[in-house]
Image: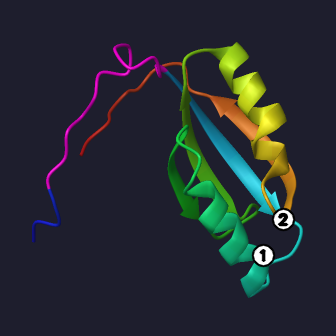
Amino acid sequence: MITGYTVILNPDAVGRNQNIFVQVTLDKQDNKTIQTFELTVQSVPEIAECYLMSGSYDYLMLVQVSDTAAYERLHRDVLTSLPGVSRISSHFALRAVTAQT
């Protein structure tokens, strides 16, 4: 039943108190594109979570940064350069209503 134990960091203390949910659509959905995208995403520390999705976009990512300027830099320098990305849609969280571990 237990898959592990975790530590929950205070987002303010680590300078990552802005949550952005990012929808990503790939230009192709072949194995090579998917594998390359997923391996690259795992190396980006600001991407806290990434899920392969069904529906109108391919991935949903939770990005955590200090502020909108930090997200703009990440978007410009990293997210738009991820392999296979054809479209990115960003949604800024105003506040958490519930967050469980």
Q: Nearer the viewer, residue 73 or 56?
A: 73
Left or right of residue 55, residue 12 in this image: left
Q: Which residue is mark 1?
A: 33
Judge whether residue 37 is colored magenta.
Answer: no
Residue 91 quadrant:
top right
- Residue located at (79% from left, 84% from top): 30
Q: CA distance from mark 1 to mark 2?
A: 6 Å
- Residue located at (62% from left, 56% from top): 41
Left or right of residue 91, residue 17 in this image: left
Left or right of residue 33, residue 86 in this image: right
**Split into 4 quadrants, where in the image is the N terminus?**
bottom left
- Residue located at (76% from left, 82% from top): 32
**Residue numbers of the magenta segment:** 5-17
Query: Where's residue 97, x and y in %?
Result: 37, 27
Crowding around mark 2 (Cα neighbors within 10 Å: few <14, some 14 to 19, many 20+) is some
Query: Where's residue 33, x and y in %?
Result: 78, 75
Q: Which residue is mark 2?
A: 84
Secondary structure category for the residue under label 2: loop
Spot the residue most to the left: 1
Tell me whether the residue at label 1 lies in contact with that at label 2, contact meaning CB atoms closer than 8 angstroms.
yes
Colour setup of the view: rainbow
In this figure, what is the number of numbered marks? 2
